[in-house]
Image (spheres, rainbow, N blue to C red):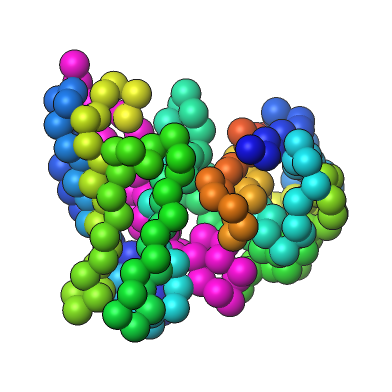
Amino acid sequence: EVVLTQSPGTLSLSPGERATLSCRASQSVSSSHLAWYQQKPGQAPRLLVYGAFSLAAGIPDRFSGSGSGTDFTLIVTRLEPEDFAVYYCQLYGTSPPYIFGQGTKLEI
Amino acid sequence: QVQLQQWGAGLLKASETLSLTCAVHGGSFSGDYWSWIRQSPEKGLEWIGEINHSGNTNYNNYNPSLKSRVTISIDASKKQFSLKLRSVTAADTAVYYCARAPLMYFFALDIWGQGTVVTVSS
């Protein structure tokens, strides 16, 4: 079973800065099946990126995804106050179970 | 715009059966996958399983770690899908979410229910 490891565990930045979040798979995976989610306290996760680099509807273009093989990245340029949350990567759509990473907390 | 509304019992005793239902409001029901996910401080986000309804056929996938205790079913006439988890223990205490996994997003989870807190007491 593939394991997704996210780093760092916590990222402390300020509004206006750039955030770089990493998701590493224990073996090569299809980029078509890598997603990123944002979760705020008391809310369900929100889909940001699917297929490693495609933005979901309504997601601002300061979010971008990239990567292939075992290494994937979510970048948030020009952080807004509402971007401070927990971010998860997920592998889905291939052989179940569709696993999640452990999350990166983006804090002010 | 598709919305998911979920409900079910939030407090269970060990060995009972967890039962949750998710109603799909708006949009099409066929073709997409409909999933259950849970979240706990101990395990983080954990995918439970999914169901796809196409024509008169249902397709299921389950997390192998839960497969022996889980059943996900669908009532297409009501646009609802349900989760049953048998023989619960304290380890099943979590927030449970239903979600849609549409083909347009390569089956990533784009619409989520509001979540149901389930607590299992011993």
Provide residue A44's location: percent of width, then percent of height.
45, 50
Of A10 and B94, nearer the camera is B94
Provide residue A104's location: percent of width, then percent of height.
67, 36
Residue at 19% over, 79% down: B77
**Quadrant, the C terminus of chain B:** top left
**Quadrant, the N terminus of chain B:** bottom left
Magenta region includes residue B98 = yes
Residue at 30% over, 44% down: B70
The range drawn in magenta is B93-122
In the rendered structure, the answer to whether residue A38 lies left or right of residue B17 reads right
In the rendered structure, the answer to whether residue A97 lies left or right of residue A35 reads left
Magenta region includes residue B75 = no
Q: Is residue B78 above or below residue B44?
A: below
Of B45 and A93, nearer the camera is A93
Provide residue B115's location: percent of width, then percent of height.
34, 48
Residue at 45% over, 73% down: B32
